[in-house]
Image (spheres, grey):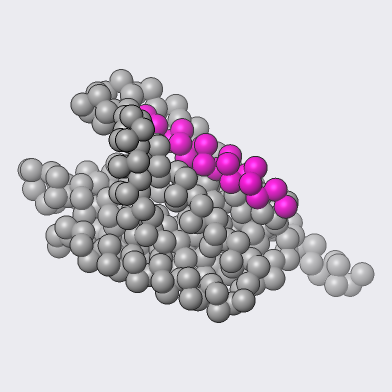
């Protein structure tokens, strides 16, 4: 069964390679994408080095990031036919992206590793989210830099600031939720919860775009951004404390 993970990963990587080859990368945006991904992935691999399946999770997340963009592009046509094109990214991205990321958690935790507790599931979900963010931001950097008419430097700086403020760890939060649900044998319920939280995050920027870059949806969405940051920070602290407690209890169990 482990080979199923590798086969699907290679297939997704092929699609994503095709996707990124077609993106309008400039030297500034390409450099920003590489540096951002290198820092984010290196920190993840270092901080979670004692957890199983982390590298697999990062690879899967990156592999499906380009595939997700391609699927999202096709989904825009379905929204337009349904008269819901005003929803923008909120109408399609959460569904395709969360399902693809959850599939990676499912494959890794059933075919590649043997999770010892619910923490292993969640940390794999976090790793998948990190890999996905690295790929998704590369696309964002490329497109936002090209769209800036002032200069490449101004475009890429603006893109990096926007992506940082909007929480680069949000994908880890979403996938962590669905991964926790998998560990509790309630995958559908928690996957739906992750999708709905993702919809909430995407809704206000989509409304802004639908109303000719209106500022009021952006202002209305600020509480959501703050809430996601609070949830992310709280979740990171809680996971760290729980992981430390689990590590400390292992020697005691061994002696018992």
Question: Is residue 217 among what the camera can see?
Answer: yes
Query: Where is residue 19, by image quadrant?
Result: bottom left
User: In the image, is residue 203 part of the stretch drawn in magenta?
Assistant: yes
User: In the image, is residue 247 part of the stretch drawn in magenta?
Assistant: no
Magenta residues, start to end: 185-206
Residue drawn at point x = 39 percent, y = 32 percent: 203
**Residue 250: x %, y % from top left:** 79, 67
**Residue at the top extreme?**
216
**Residue 34: x %, y % from top left:** 29, 64
**Residue 173: x %, y % from top left:** 53, 47
Judged by its main secondary structure, the magenta piece is helix
Question: Is residue 46 among what the camera can see?
Answer: no
Query: Is 24 positioned to the left or the right of 169 in the image?
Result: left
Q: In this view, does 212 lie above or below 184?
A: above
How many numbered marks are there?
Answer: 0
Residue drawn at point x = 59 percent, y = 67 percent: 108
Query: Is 69 positioned to the left or the right of 170 in the image?
Result: left
**Residue 104: x %, y % from top left:** 53, 62
């Amino acid at each position: 069964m482990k080979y199923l993970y590798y086969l699907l990963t290679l297939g997704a990587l092929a699609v994503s390679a095709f996707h990124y080859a077609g993106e309008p990368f400039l030297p500034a945006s390409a450099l920003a994408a590489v540096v951002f991904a290198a820092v984010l992935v290196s920190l993840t691999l270092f901080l979670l080095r004692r957890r199983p399946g982390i590298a697999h999770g990062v690879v899967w997340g990156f592999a499906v990031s380009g595939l997700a963009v391609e699927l999202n592009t096709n989904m825009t046509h379905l929204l337009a036919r349904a008269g819901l094109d005003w929803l923008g990214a909120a109408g399609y991205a959460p569904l395709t992206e969360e399902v693809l990321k959850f599939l990676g958690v499912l494959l890794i935790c059933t075919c590649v590793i043997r999770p010892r507790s619910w923490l292993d599931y969640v940390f794999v979900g976090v790793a998948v989210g990190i890999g996905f963010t690295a790929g998704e931001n590369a696309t964002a950097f490329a497109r936002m830099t090209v769209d800036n008419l002032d200069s490449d430097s101004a475009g890429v700086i603006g893109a990096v600031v926007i992506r940082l403020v909007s929480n680069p760890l949000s994908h880890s939060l979403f996938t962590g939720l669905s991964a926790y649900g998998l560990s509790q044998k309630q995958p559908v319920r928690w996957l739906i919860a992750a999708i709905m939280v993702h919809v909430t995050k995407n809704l206000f920027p989509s409304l802004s775009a639908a109303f000719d870059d209106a500022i009021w949806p952006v202002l209305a969405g600020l509480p959501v951004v703050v809430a996601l940051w609070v949830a992310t920070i709280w979740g990171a602290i809680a996971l760290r404390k729980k992981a430390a407690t689990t590590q400390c209890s292992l020697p005691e169990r061994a002696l018992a």
